[in-house]
Image: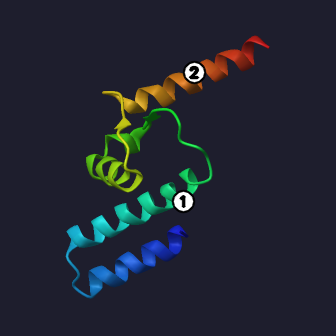
Amino acid sequence: MCTVFAESEVVSLITSGEPKEKIALGLHLSIAQRLQAMFSKIPLVDDILFVGGRAKNDCLHAILERQLKRTIKRPEEPQIVVALGAALLANDMTAA
């Protein structure tokens, strides 16, 4: 989904008096549907680990589990996993 289109749609919904909670849920569902479409292109045979800042979003986590019909694991501080990966990659690049 184009973020400019999404922003325009959200502004329109807010202006029309749509409850903010309903708008937020719609955005979460849209993100989860997009991720589900991406997941459908790869075999999901192992555990799924949800990392990065978005993994702290309980609503998105619950929607993804429901849509994928799978338990999705996430570390206590999921954003640190991404930062650690970036640091390790940077270290490998400077060592080469």
Label 1's element?
Answer: helix
Q: Residue furthest bottom?
A: 16
Tell me the crowding category of disc 2: few under 14, some 14 to 19, or many 20 or more residues within 10 angstroms, Cα based: few
Which image quarter: residue 50? top left
Tell me the crowding category of disc 1: few under 14, some 14 to 19, or many 20 or more residues within 10 angstroms, Cα based: few
Residue 40 screen position, x and y as percent: 56, 54
State how many labels appear.
2
The amino acid type, in three-letter code, at marker 1 is Ala
Residue 59 screen position, x and y as percent: 27, 52
Q: Residue at x 32, y 40 (%)?
A: 56
The amino acid type, in three-letter code, at marker 2 is Ala
Quadrant (top left, top right, bottom left, bottom right) of the C terminus: top right
Instruction: Compare marks 1 and 2 and give the one earlier in the sequence.
Output: 1
Residue 16 screen position, x and y as percent: 26, 88
Residue 37 marker: 1
Q: Residue furthest right?
A: 96
Q: Residue at x 46, y 26 (%)?
A: 81
Label 2's element?
Answer: helix
Decide if residue 8 is on the left or right side of residue 77: right
Disc 2 marks which residue? 87
The vertical placement of 10 against 60, above or below, is: below
Decide if residue 91 is on the left or right side of residue 38: right
Residue 85 marker: none
Q: Calculate the distance from the C-alpha at mark 1 to the C-alpha at mark 2.
A: 30 Å
The vertical placement of 31 against 14, above or below, is: above
Q: Nearer the viewer, mark 1 or mark 2?
A: 1
